[in-house]
Image (cartoon, rainbow, N blue to C red):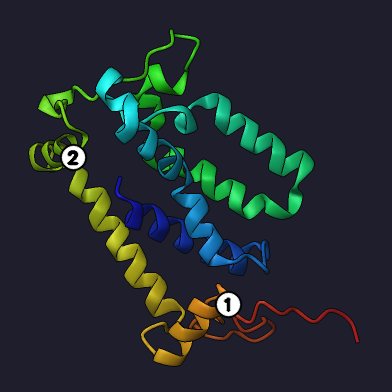
Amino acid sequence: MLPPSHIAYTWAALSLAQEKLDVFPDADYRLVALAATGPDLLDKPLAWAYFYRRYKSAVLFAHTLLINLAVLFLVWKRFPRWRAYGLAFLGHGLLDRLWFFPDTFLWPFRGWHFHVWGKRGSEQPEIGKAYWYAFTRRPELWRWELGGMLALLWFVWRHRLYRWENLWRFLLTGRPGPVRPGPHRPGQNQPGSNQLHKGG
């Protein structure tokens, strides 16, 4: 999956979680975007520099179960204020469906090598060609990218980021603002307020 789709799916999920579950009210969506692409930001430079030539893989250490469990432990036990970002990091592996890459996901328990990009001719001597061949020979991959585009459009519509002042505030603060109001039913707080006043 390409980085924009990782970010779009994660932003959409966080927006819903903030409204429906009343969690992570202070999350910075800019940091969430970095965390959602974190495994690629760590692994892709390593692949370009050395590991793709050796292992024909761009899915390396940051995509392993060990690293994901370490991140989960750190944000749950040591740094609870970073849980939104930790979950965004873990969500990357979920969206990449890492269980289809067992040599990487279970590294090093299946050996010291990583999963080879060899499905349906996507393995190439150069990493750039591997991406090109994967997306030109495997049209099913575009369904995930189309879903990511729709998730981003929904997120922009939900928070009215098509308005310049809202988009500018989002870029400066990392917070998208209140959601588009839905039908209001008596006895309920207006959706998207994110500010529930209890008592008094």
Number of the label disc, if any, that sits on residue 160: none
Q: How many marks?
A: 2
Q: Quadrant of the N terminus?
A: top left
- Relative to residue 128, is residue 105 depicted above or below? above
Horizontal placement of 57 versus 122: left or right? right
Mark 1 or 2, which is nearer the eye? 2
User: Which sits in the foreground, 159 or 136?
Assistant: 136
- Relative to residue 38, is residue 58 depicted above or below? above
Number of the label disc, if any, that sits on residue 173: 1
- Relative to residue 41, is residue 31 depicted above or below? below
The furthest residue to the front: 49
Residue at left 48%, top 26%? 64
Q: Position of residue 164 (x, y in %)?
A: 40, 90
The kind of residue on which mark 1 rests is Thr
Q: In 3D space, how far apart are the residues under numbered discs 1 and 2 (Cα atoms)?
A: 34 Å
Horizontal placement of 127 versus 197: left or right? left
Question: Would you say residue 116 is visible in this rendering?
Answer: no
Residue at left 61%, top 46%? 86
Q: Quadrant of the C terminus?
A: bottom right
User: Which sits in the foreground, 51 or 37?
Assistant: 51
User: Which sits in the foreground, 63 or 178?
Assistant: 63
The kind of residue on which mark 2 rests is Gly
Q: Position of residue 95 (x, y in %)?
A: 40, 43
Question: Would you say residue 45 is visible in this rendering?
Answer: yes
Residue at left 14%, top 27%? 124
Q: What secondary structure is found at the residue carrying circle 1?
A: helix
Q: What secondary structure is found at the residue carrying circle 2?
A: helix
Residue at left 21%, top 49%? 143
User: Which sits in the foreground, 93 or 150?
Assistant: 93
Horizontal placement of 170 versus 119: left or right? right
For marks 1 and 2, the one nearer the N-term is: 2
Number of the label disc, if any, that sits on residue 128: 2
